[in-house]
């Protein structure tokens, strides 16, 4: 028997050994799905001698992809450059760089993030003064349409006033800028495969074995992507847990997963039911909560792990008491003589170690909840890392730096060029400079050229011919300012040909920061520099391209550093796939868990693509909220704390809160109450009343 099978249970072994044909691995939380996937991949390489280039594994995050590659390297013993493991976005981007030209983009297309998309939409909206929608809501609608594979030309006015035109214009401008947005990465590849069967076949013949983790959360575009790529050889292995489908609000459709056996009637189905992660108690609690959802592939989870402590239910006065309670418990476990078993399989062997900060995770429904906890940690001296929330690329100085790098890489990228044009006053007054930019933009639009070309055109004209076609005159000082700007650009472009990403970031910093402000003080820029360092192994131009690609694809949870000895703070969504010895879930209150806005808000509607009054509401999202809570519960290995407050500062005001209705599904004998003393609570609330909550 292969050494790779030794560390797996019989069902996992079966999943690993079934290498040919379609296979569905239906498994609950913590049953080793992701682990089995890695072993299956390693088995294909080591035992079946399949070349690394013929295998593809799709993961939900870049971080998961990185971990999988590391694990496979350990299992197989060699570095496998040819292996394709990544997110849908990352893999699509790589393939598009090779094949995209028939669609009208060149292989060094840029990838736009939220900032650029909004900026583009803002410019388009300036031509539609009657349109009352915000750039953010249009962006969301466009994304939803793309996830449903709906092109602008398939829409009519029923999709909303001006929406088809704006969507169309948005696509045109993306192409003019040689850029794609994130959704386009997947959509474009699906289109390309549909339009060019020979490209599809080349990809099919390359990737003979395909595996997809977290399959319950794929949307229609991703579903088509997988279907097309796998339909020739049908060696498709999908892994998922219907109980953990939490992305319907982003267009994911659990039905794709539930219908797998219809798509592939010959598929083998393997069920993994042994949980290796949590105590019996935690597993039972989670089971009681999830029992009430309807769209399930019925499965029974069990574990050989210890019974474990009852889970803590912690009623508190407000969010401050909640934070205090968490600090108190962490200090108790770190400082006291508490230990936890290192390995759940050896739970009775008495092998133990003391808790460290990275053993704890604090999970919440909304990012806004983290501030109070972070503050409490800071004053208690507890190290923590916030995962997700504000992303590096959203920090002003990083966004500016990236705009420079993008223009160096692709001067035709008018959106990024506009961002840097909008920054410094080029030795003329601000109003005059704004006027200059407007004139340049006007020229670019009327001539159908990029901003960069507009700049070149202005500078190429004789000084006496300062008249722009329809945009009035530019003064001599304005032309001088443009010239100054253009010469900086040329200088940076030249540097781009010689320098690798990290050195280039430093060069841009010195050149654009004439006052010599100490940039070393900027944390976000230092972080960006650190991210650039690994790209020093590539030659100059490639180094920049690879770096920009990596930055564009950074996901919310990719910043999580497992090796840091710090408590992890993140949303329930971001915690998917992770595990921690001790988990605190905050705000287990009606309105937060389940999140009420998500039940009624229009943001959870599919865009009104099929008419404003169509039945386009998502399936009742309380079910999805219940699954999200289940995801949170099943992250815990040893101890689980559920906090709920009587009042909470939310949406700018104090709100009176009730415990989450989901708590009522947890039998009392599995819980114990933790009372967090709070001066205010004692004064204002008699203890009996707190207890009546239970
Ligand atoms: P989730 O549903 O949360 O994504 P999962 O099903 O992907 O979970 P993994 O993360 O792969 O589960 O595994 C959960 C834990 O159980 C990990 O710590 C893993 O190492 C451990 N585990 C899984 N299978 C085994 C096994 N056969 N023997 C020992 N430990 C195992
Ligand atoms: Mg997993």
Image (cartoon, helix red, strand yellow):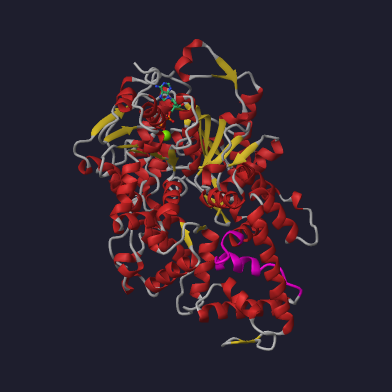
Quadrant containing the C terminus is top left
The image quadrant of residue 175 is bottom left
Which residue is found at the position 62% from the left and 26% from the top? Answer: 356
Is residue 475 something that shows in the picture?
yes
Give ligand 1's quarter of the image.
Answer: top left
Report x, y in % for residue 348.
47, 12
* Residue 363 position in % (x across, y down): 52, 40
**Quadrant of the frame with the N terminus:** top left
Q: Relative to 264, is 448 on the left or the right? A: right
622 falls in the magenta region: no
Q: Name the foreground residue: 478 vs 14.
A: 478
> Is any part of residue 213 visible from this angle?
no
**Residue at the spot x=47%, y=38% of the render?**
65
Query: Is residue 416 shown in magenta?
Result: yes
Q: Is residue 327 left or right of residue 520?
A: left
Farthest residue in the top direction? Answer: 349
Residue 242 appears at what percent x and percent y? 33, 39
Along the line of sight, the residue nearer the viewer: 609 or 493: 493
In the rendered structure, which segment of residues is drawn in magenta? 408-427
């Amino acid at each position: 028997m292969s050494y790779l099978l030794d560390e797996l249970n019989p069902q996992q072994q079966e999943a690993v050994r079934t290498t040919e044909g379609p296979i569905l691995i239906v498994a609950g939380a913590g049953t080793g799905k992701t682990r089995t996937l890695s072993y299956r991949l390693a088995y294909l390489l080591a035992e079946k001698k399949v070349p690394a280039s013929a295998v593809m594994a799709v993961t939900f995050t870049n971080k998961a992809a990185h971990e999988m590659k590391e694990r496979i390297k350990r299992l197989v013993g060699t570095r496998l450059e040819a292996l394709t493991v990544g997110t849908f976005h990352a893999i699509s981007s790589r393939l598009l760089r090779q094949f995209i030209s028939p669609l009208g983009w060149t292989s060094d297309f840029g990838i736009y993030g939220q900032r650029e998309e909004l900026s583009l939409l803002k410019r388009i909206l300036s031509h539609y003064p009657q349109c009352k929608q915000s750039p953010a809501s249009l962006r969301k609608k466009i994304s939803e349409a793309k996830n449903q594979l709906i092109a602008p030309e398939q829409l009519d006015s029923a999709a909303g006033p001006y929406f088809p035109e704006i969507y169309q214009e948005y696509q045109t401008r993306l192409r003019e800028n040689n850029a794609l947005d994130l959704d386009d990465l997947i959509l474009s590849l699906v289109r390309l495969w549909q339009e060019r069967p020979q490209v599809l076949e080349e990809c099919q013949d390359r990737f003979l074995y395909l595996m997809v983790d977290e399959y319950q959360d794929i949307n229609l575009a991703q579903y088509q992507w997988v279907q097309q790529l796998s339909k020739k050889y049908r060696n498709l292995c999908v892994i998922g847990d219907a109980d953990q489908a939490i992305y319907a609000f982003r267009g994911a459709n659990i039905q794709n997963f539930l219908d797998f056996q219809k798509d592939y009637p010959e598929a083998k189905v393997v069920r993994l039911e042994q949980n290796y992660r949590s105590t019996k108690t935690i597993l039972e609690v989670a089971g009681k909560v999830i029992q009430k959802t309807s769209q399930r592939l019925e499965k029974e989870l069990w574990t050989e792990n210890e019974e474990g402590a009852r889970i803590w239910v912690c009623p508190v006065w407000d969010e401050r008491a909640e934070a205090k309670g968490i600090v108190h418990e962490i200090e108790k476990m770190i400082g006291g003589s508490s230990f936890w078993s290192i390995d759940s399989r050896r739970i009775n062997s008495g092998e133990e170690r003391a808790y460290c900060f990275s053993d704890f995770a604090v999970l919440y429904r909304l990012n806004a909840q983290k501030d109070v906890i972070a503050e409490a940690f800071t004053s208690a001296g507890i190290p923590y890392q916030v995962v997700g929330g504000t992303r590096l690329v959203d920090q002003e100085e990083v966004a500016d730096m990236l705009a420079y790098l993008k223009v160096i890489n692709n001067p035709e990228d008018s959106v990024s060029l506009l961002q840097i044009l909008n920054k410094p006053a080029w030795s003329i007054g601000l109003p005059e400079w704004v006027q200059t930019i407007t004139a340049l933009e006007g020229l670019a639009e009327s001539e159908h050229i990029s901003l960069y070309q507009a700049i070149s055109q202005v500078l190429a004209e004789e000084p006496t011919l300062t008249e722009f076609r329809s945009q009035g005159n530019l003064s001599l000082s304005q032309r001088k300012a443009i010239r100054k700007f253009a010469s900086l650009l040329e200088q940076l472009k030249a540097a781009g040909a010689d320098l690798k990403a990290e050195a280039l970031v430093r060069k841009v910093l010195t050149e654009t920061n004439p006052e010599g402000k100490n940039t070393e003080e900027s944390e976000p820029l230092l972080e960006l520099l650190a991210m650039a360092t690994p790209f020093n192994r590539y030659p100059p131009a490639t180094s920049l391209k690879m770096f920009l690609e990596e930055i564009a694809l950074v996901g919310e949870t990719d910043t999580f550093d497992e090796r840091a000895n710090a408590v992890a703070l993140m949303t329930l969504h971001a915690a998917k796939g992770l595990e921690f010895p001790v988990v605190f879930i905050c705000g287990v209150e009606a309105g937060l868990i389940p999140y009420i806005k998500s039940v009624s808000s229009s943001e959870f509607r599919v865009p009104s693509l099929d008419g404003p009054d169509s039945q386009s509401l998502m399936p009742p999202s309380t079910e999805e909220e219940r699954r999200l809570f289940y995801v949170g519960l099943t992250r815990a290995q040893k101890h689980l704390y559920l906090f709920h407050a009587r009042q909470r500062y939310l949406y700018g005001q104090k709100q009176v809160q009730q415990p989450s209705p989901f708590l009522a599904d947890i039998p009392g004998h599995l819980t114990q109450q933790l009372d967090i003393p709070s001066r205010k609570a004692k004064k204002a609330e008699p203890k009996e009343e707190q207890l009546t909550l239970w």
